[in-house]
Amino acid sequence: MIYFEDMQVGDRASFGSYPVTRDEVLEFAQKYDPQPFHLSDEAAAQTHFVRLAASGWHTAAMTMAMLVEQMKLRPTASLGAAGIDELRWIRPVFPGDTLRCETELLEKRESEKRPEIGRTRSRMLVFNQQDEPVLSFIANALVARRPHTPD
């Protein structure tokens, strides 16, 4: 288990491989972001996307799926998120793309009110198969501190 104390500013990780499918793009858009350019090639052809594009929110959800899979491989004492900052959709994501993630721990600090918790800020970058960035944000997370064992 990776606890707050195990994390060092500057730590980096690369992980994930998420194939973006047409069916999933359409299903997500129909349910959560039914803008025309997320629903049909014809509508997208009339925009700067030129073809069917995944919702940015879908890209964020795919990123979260990769992050959770990574946490299964490298169990972390995560206590959840405290929000995100600076969310940017850098370039469109299309069916047929394959996404991957890179993170860097930017800062960490102990909670002032809850000594059993640490707070972290990490930059998340998501890339397509051409190593072009498609999404970025700063993740603010809560991480458990190592349990104290009596001597």
Image (tube, rainbow, N blue to C red):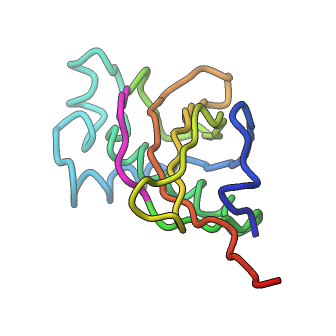
The chief SS type of the magenta part is: strand
Residue furthest to the top: 48
Instruction: State the extent of the magenta-drawn residues as a range.
Output: 81-88
Query: Is 76 in the magenta?
Result: no
Residues 39 and 66: in front is 66
Residue furthest to the front: 151
Q: Is residue 110 above or below residue 136?
A: below
Residue furthest to the bottom: 150
Check the picture and name the quadrant holding the C terminus.
Answer: bottom right
Q: Residue at x 21, y 55 (%)?
A: 32
Q: Residue at x 38, y 49 (%)?
A: 25
Q: Residue at x 70, y 76 (%)?
A: 148
Residues 95 and 60: in front is 60
Where residue 143 sits in the image (x, y, percent)?
A: 56, 60
**In the picture provided, is 145 more to the left or to the right than 37?**
right
**In the picture provided, is 36 more to the left or to the right than 113?**
left
Residue furthest to the left: 35
Where residue 99 sits in the image (x, y, percent)?
A: 60, 40
Check the picture and name the quadrant holding the N terminus.
Answer: bottom right
Residues 42 and 9: in front is 9
**In the picture provided, is 92 more to the left or to the right than 143?**
left
Q: Is residue 125 above or below residue 21?
A: above
Q: Residue at x 59, y 55 (%)?
A: 67
Where residue 46 sits in the image (x, y, percent)?
A: 21, 19
